[in-house]
Image (cartoon, rainbow, N blue to C red):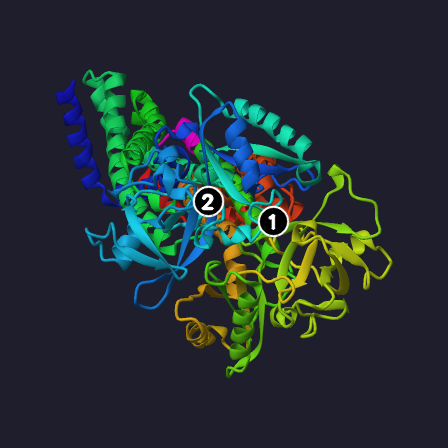
């Protein structure tokens, strides 16, 4: 059997060499289909299929708070709530916590911003990950009197410390405090907060004795139950499911709610598997992309099958002779399948190279918000997938031609050969069905791409509520150990803003804690003075930020009523507040909110007068509602972390260097990070849908080209096959335009049938895309009308050339061939 197989492959290889044009076209089609599939599958494999690099990752879960009123299902935990969950649950083997933090690293060179985390001492042991160098945290490392220690990432160790093998035990300076390095993590390690790419980890001080080991997001009242800044990560006990853990932890949440009704009313808990947490909402989009490239592969298969049918027609006499000499039908099928498999394997091998290049291109683009991006590569699973796709592809496009060619009718073959024909009607029907199937799949793919493009354009046209032009942004995080007092924070920002304001080319400079369209989101509960307290189901929550007096002018948020903050709104002045238009319309419809009062219980519980109303802005994303937004003067409510918003007279990127110089001139150990123009921030907020739309558009364009080539091939082959018939028609008096209508009618009939079936299928398929669309319905009438018109027009252009060729047939030459 192996000897026969090698013979078939050797014979098939010789045939491919003898027909280089056919072989190149077929191999390119297969390469395109398998390469695209392998590239997208490598992403699916890394993001969805590959196990997380932790010990028994299926038992790891994230523990979040759940705000029932606002619907926020991933709400931070307070330190006291975390302790209660840790002590009273019956389903977790361990429960650890962490909090995001930004650090300023000083090593004698320029200060550098490094993202990191404060973690509980059992964080790494819970994950089951050992350092590549040094030791993990010990249980006593988060105690009040413990030495300040730090673990660094492999990348930071290699880049900043030259991969020094004696690094463990050295002292590094973070946020102005000295820490002893005790370990370096493995290069493959990613924290549960992988999207923040932490590079340093510090044991959290749970009693507040050491200000350099407290998250700045916790504030000075971090032990207050209303101060929520922790994220929990737990390991389930053996044989405990996520749903069982959810039920048990909800019991603990209800007990806390009953014990502290004023603070925890309406708050529950949400348990999410770590894998689901990391992949987020990217799964539907990846599956749509995988289905799209699968469609491209099917179209490529149909094209190659048509090529093989045409080639088999020219070899009918060869197969008839083989059958006459005793070759069985199975033997002929095996020979033809060997040739098609050889084509598909060569195309698959080249497709693997194409996939490798595509992955490198994707990694070079470094799109944000793609989880596990660094893990995308070609591993044994991707190789196996490519081999499987190649073999199946060879079988799919080789089976129909093999079945057709392996059952020759000797008499019919001789008759057709005597006429110079190259195929029969049954073969033409198969080719027509393949073309129809191509058009069906192309119609579906084009409609999906059309909906995504229209959705992305709708997203791009959303008014964010501010003006991003000529605006530079950067973030600062003052270390709480060095800037622990409010007057120190105010003093730093006051001096910095004055320094920047007088720089040449600066129109105005603002500062805000919550820069729009970034991950920095702070929400607080508020009450309206003079109104009955809200019930648990009516809790009022608003995105809250502290700003300076020039912030609204700098970022371009319009003032609708009242006044902005000014220099008189100081620490000892009457507390004031500015609200957005949503709050004004929702709670004072038809009335003037200026002079009314709001109270934020978590921020001192003092009554604050509304002095202004500003326009709504898109804060969490262009696709989300603006919601309630509250602004406080930073002089009255200082925060360590702020974003600068510098409005320049022209190109804002040119201002970055001089602004950074002013920061280090004020504090040599302080660095800024995330230095971007505001337009870059807006663009990055839609980077994920932009990438999906681009890929779908490319796949749809490739599918359309392949479908056009398929239609052209079938019609052109049909014209060649019917030269004798056309010659007779012309000799009997048919006009050239009659021949043109006949050929065009044949092709357009196939095209219209394919488009109609494709429209019906697309109408059913696009229902699953609702969650991926913005501002456009999955049944968008314009898309469903325009795409068929475009596709029919392209089909007509594909038919036009062979139809014109048929018009020019010389009847004398056609009859002389007979």
Q: Residues within 10 Å of mark 2 (few under 14, many from 20)?
A: many
Q: Quadrant of the C terminus?
A: top left
Q: Which residues are magenta?
A: 423-432
Q: Position of residue 707 (x, y in %)?
A: 44, 43
Circles 1 and 2 in contact, beta carbons < 8 Å: no
Identify residue for label 2. 730
Spatial CA span between label 1 and label 2: 38 Å
Above or below, 377 relative to 500: above
Q: Is residue 616 magenta?
A: no
| Image quadrant where residue 725 sits | top left
Q: Nearer the viewer, residue 659 or 617?
A: 659
The answer to which quarter of the image holds residue 372 is top left
Apparent side of residue 386 relative to residue 223 in the rendered image (left or right): left
In the image, residue 774 lies at what x, y percent?
Answer: 61, 48
Q: How many numbered discs?
A: 2
**Closer-to-camera residue (195/322):** 195
108 left or right, relative to 143: left
- Rendered image: mark on residue 786: 1
Q: Residue at x 52, y 46 (%)?
A: 449
Specify whether 728 is left or right of 178: right
Element assignment for label 1: helix
Using a 10 Å C-alpha cutoff, classify the residue at mark 1 as few (fewer than 14 neighbours), some (14 to 19) or many (20 or more). Answer: few
Q: Secondary structure at mark 2?
A: helix
Against 314, residue 632 (above or below) is below
Give the quadrant of residue 364.
Answer: bottom left
Residue 425 seen by the camera = no
Q: Residue at x 18, y 35 (%)?
A: 13
Residue 752 - label: none
Q: Residue 247: in sight, yes or no?
A: yes
Mark 1 or mark 2: name the one nearer the start of the chain: 2
Is 68 in front, or is 149? 149
Find residue 164 and report its horizontal and vertical position in percent: 20, 54
């Amino acid at each position: 059997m192996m000897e026969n197989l090698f013979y078939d492959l050797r014979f098939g290889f010789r045939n491919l060499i003898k027909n280089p044009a056919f072989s190149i076209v077929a191999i390119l089609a297969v390469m395109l289909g398998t390469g695209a599939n392998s590239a997208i599958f490598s992403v699916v494999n890394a993001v969805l299929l590959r196990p997380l690099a932790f010990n028994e990752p299926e038992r790891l879960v994230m523990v979040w708070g759940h705000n029932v009123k606002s619907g926020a299902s991933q709400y931070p935990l307070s330190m006291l709530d975390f302790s209660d969950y840790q002590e009273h649950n019956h389903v977790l083997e361990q429960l650890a916590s962490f909090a995001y933090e930004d650090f300023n690293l000083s090593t004698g060179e320029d200060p550098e911003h490094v993202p990191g985390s404060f973690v509980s001492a059992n964080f790494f042991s819970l994950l089951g990950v050992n350092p590549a160098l040094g030791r993990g945290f010990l249980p006593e490392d988060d105690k009040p009197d413990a030495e300040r220690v730090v673990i660094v990432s492999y990348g930071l160790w290699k880049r900043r410390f030259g991969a020094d093998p004696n690094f463990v035990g050295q002292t590094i300076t973070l946020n102005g405090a000295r820490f002893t390095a005790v370990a370096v993590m493995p290069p493959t390690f990613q924290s549960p907060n992988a999207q923040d790419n932490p590079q340093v980890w510090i044991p959290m001080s749970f009693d507040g004795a050491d200000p350099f080991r407290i998250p700045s997001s916790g504030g000075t009242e971090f032990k207050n139950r209303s101060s929520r800044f922790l994220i929990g990560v737990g390991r389930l006990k053996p044989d405990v499911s996520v749903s069982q853990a959810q039920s048990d932890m909800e019991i603990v949440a209800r007990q806390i709610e009953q014990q502290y009704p004023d603070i925890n009313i309406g708050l529950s808990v949400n348990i999410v598997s770590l894998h689901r947490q990391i992949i987020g909402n990217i799964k539907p989009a990846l599956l749509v992309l995988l289905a799209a490239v699968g469609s491209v592969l099917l179209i490529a298969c149909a094209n190659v099958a048509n090529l093989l049918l045409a080639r088999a027609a020219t070899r009918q006499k060869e197969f008839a002779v083989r059958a006459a000499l005793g070759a069985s039908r199975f033997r002929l099928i095996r020979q033809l399948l060997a040739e098609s498999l050889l084509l598909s394997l060569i195309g698959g091998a080249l497709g693997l190279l194409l996939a490798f290049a595509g992955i490198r291109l994707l990694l070079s683009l470094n799109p944000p918000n793609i989880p596990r991006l660094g893990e995308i590569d070609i591993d044994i699973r991707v190789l196996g997938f490519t081999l499987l796709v190649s073999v199946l592809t060879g079988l799919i496009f080789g089976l129909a031609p093999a079945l057709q060619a392996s059952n020759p009718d000797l008499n019919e073959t001789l008759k057709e050969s005597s006429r110079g024909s190259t195929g029969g009607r049954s073969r033409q029907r198969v080719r027509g069905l393949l073309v129809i199937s191509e058009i069906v799949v192309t119609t579906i793919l084009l409609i999906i791409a059309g909906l995504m493009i229209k959705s992305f354009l709708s997203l791009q046209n959303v008014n964010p509520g501010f003006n991003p032009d000529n605006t530079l942004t950067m973030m600062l995080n003052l270390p709480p150990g060095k800037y622990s007092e409010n007057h120190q924070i105010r003093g730093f920002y006051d001096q910095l803003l004055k320094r920047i304001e007088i720089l040449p080319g600066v129109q105005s400079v603002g500062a805000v804690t919550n820069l729009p369209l970034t991950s920095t989101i702070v929400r607080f509960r508020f009450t309206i003075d003079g109104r009955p307290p809200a019930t648990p189901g009516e809790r009022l929550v608003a995105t809250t930020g502290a700003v300076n007096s020039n912030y609204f002018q700098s970022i371009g948020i319009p003032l609708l009523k009242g006044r902005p903050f000014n220099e008189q709104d100081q620490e000892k002045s009457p507390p004031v507040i500015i609200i957005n238009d949503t709050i004004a319309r929702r709670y004072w419809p038809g009335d003037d909110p200026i002079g009314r009062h709001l109270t934020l219980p978590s921020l001192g519980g003092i009554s604050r007068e509304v002095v202004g109303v500003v326009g709504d802005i898109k804060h969490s994303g262009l696709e989300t509602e603006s919601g309630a937004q509250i602004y406080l003067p930073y002089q009255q409510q200082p925060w360590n972390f702020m974003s600068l918003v510098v409005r320049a007279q022209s190109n804002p990127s040119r201002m970055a260097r001089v602004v950074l110089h002013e920061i280090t001139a004020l504090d040599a150990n302080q660095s800024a990070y995330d230095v971007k123009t505001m337009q870059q921030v807006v663009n990055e907020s839609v980077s994920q849908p932009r990438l999906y739309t681009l890929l779908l558009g490319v796949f749809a364009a490739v599918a359309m080209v392949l479908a056009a080539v398929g239609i052209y091939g079938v019609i052109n082959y049909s014209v060649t096959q019917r030269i004798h018939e056309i010659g007779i028609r012309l000799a009997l008096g048919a006009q050239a335009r009659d021949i043109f209508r006949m050929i065009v009618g044949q092709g357009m009939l196939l095209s219209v049938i394919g488009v109609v079936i494709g429209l019906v299928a697309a109408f059913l398929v696009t229902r699953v895309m609702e969650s991926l669309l913005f501002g456009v319905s999955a049944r968008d009438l314009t898309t469903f009308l325009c795409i068929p018109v475009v596709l029919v027009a392209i089909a007509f252009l594909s038919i036009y050339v062979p139809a014109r060729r048929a018009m020019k047939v010389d009847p004398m030459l056609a009859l002389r061939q007979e």
